[in-house]
Amino acid sequence: MKAYKILTVGMLALSATACNSFLDVTPDNRTELDSPEAMKELLVSAYPRAHYYHVCEVMSDNVAERLVTGTHSRATLNRQMYMWEEGTETGTDNPVYVWTNYYESIAAANIVLEALENEEDTKEYAAIKGEALVCRAFCHFLLVNLFAEHYDPDKAGRMLGIPYCVKPETEAIVHYKRNSLKEVYDLIEEDLQAGLPLLQDQSYEVPKYHFTKAAAHAFAARFYQYKAEWDSVIVHATAALGNSPKSKLRDLRNPAQANGRWGDKDAYASKYFKVDQPSPFLMISAKSWWARDAQSFSLHYGMKKNEHASLFMDKNVTGSPVTGTYATFFVISTNSAGCARMYKFDELFIRTTIGASTGVGYAVSTLLSSEEALLNRAEAYIMKNQFDLALEDINLYLGERVRVNNDDAHADFTPYKVDLAKIKAFYDGQEAYPDLQPFYSGTISEDQMSMLKCVVDWRRKEFMQEGLRWFDIKRFHLPVVHTFEVSGEPAITLTGDDLRRAIQIPSEAQAFGVEANPR
């Protein structure tokens, strides 16, 4: 049995003394992958171990400049992302940290896959192979959608992707070439299609932290959505959701009313990302300060009261008479300076020693969920001109998020269901909802555009502070305007085709041959 060295991966030279590019080999730190149990243990490291939330949220239109006092240890990251600048720091939550940790996860998957080449073709080993392949595909998928432009089939062969790594590195110094965007997507699809049929849900002790069949189908639905292959989106989203999608949606009523009162923030946060919730298909726990930063009132750029009142508190497309704090079942609070925050993340803080005041923060979150799968399917139905099916999914979702009676959280939603006319009346011609410009925009009818705006609007609300808005901004070429109402600086705009939508390749990776993104 071959001894596999535990590797630190990331295509980086983070210090002057590091001589490696993709590997940092520790000769006396080896693991024998001599059993299914050993391989499963290593596969835990094949899942994303960093969060892109701070990067993506602050680059998006979910934030604005706020009046704050004092300093913050991630003020530089916060400012650079708001300005769409290259990240210069290497600490937790910075772009280079995301890049490094995702490639480390890919390396773990590759080590397992190589070890499997020498094993018998048993059902247990097949399941391990399936999980490793889907993990490798997923990490590359997230990386390419962060550090490259969005997929366009007519241009993908000429567009820069990322290095797609399929083998463990054996050399200390390696220079890397970026695959084209088409090559990356083809390889993701190859891994996904090969791995998904091999997955076995019963092999996991805690399925929510692994690629179950449902999680892999949810990933596939998003993958094919980005390629605009709508039939595949519907097939995979339906496989993930099953026969009773409503039973899989997160119930926001009960945690919001914990301890006998509406808006119990601590209870809401403690229950939002939990394995006993039906909504999460794939959860991770990653080293990150986002659980506290998302709720911080001391970062200059973040959620702001006025902007988010229009999203969560004003009248919405349903026509519900309830406005203000109770308009939806999301829990948000504000302070006197006009800052706003939601309560989704509950930090796990690991102290350096018993009784120490210092330590490491971890944010538990969901990367794939039933809500996303449902909204993705609705979008696919829209693009197939199957409006009746799209409206079924949209109304199912809205019925679980919009409060229609101030005194009864379980009041009948039926009178407030939306239809095409209602959607058009609310979204058409509104400056807040500009036309979407995906690569297939020439095929979108006026009615489809109205329906799509509704889905995109509610996807923004549902995944506020979870980063997904940034991917819709890229996919639909939406402009982003960042203002400076506090400091008085001139507003800055990220246009629909601005090259800065692709995060710059970390300089540490550029030093080892990874071509920089054009600017």
Image (spheres, rainbow, N blue to C red):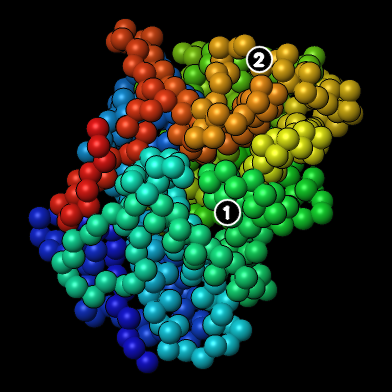
* Residue at image mark 2: 428
Residue drawn where x is 42% and y is 36% of the image: 56
- Taking the image as shown, residue 499 lies to the left or right of residue 128, namely left
Residue with the mark numbered 1: 219
**Mark 2 belongs to which amino acid?**
Asp
Element at badge 1? helix
User: Eyeballing the image, is 1 above or below 173?
Assistant: below
| The quarter of the displayed image where residue 461 is located | top right
Q: Quadrant of the N terminus?
A: bottom left
**Could you say where residue 40 lies in the image, as x and y percent from the top left?**
50, 76
Q: How many marks?
A: 2
Name the residue located 72 percent from the left edge and 57 percent from the top edge: 239
- Label 1, residues with CA under 10 Å away: few <14, some 14-19, many ≥20: many
Residue 209 drawn at (x, y percent): 57, 61
Question: Residue 288, image x and y in percent?
Answer: 41, 47
| Residue drawn where x is 22% and y is 38% of the image | 88
Compute the Cα span from label 2 to label 1: 31 Å
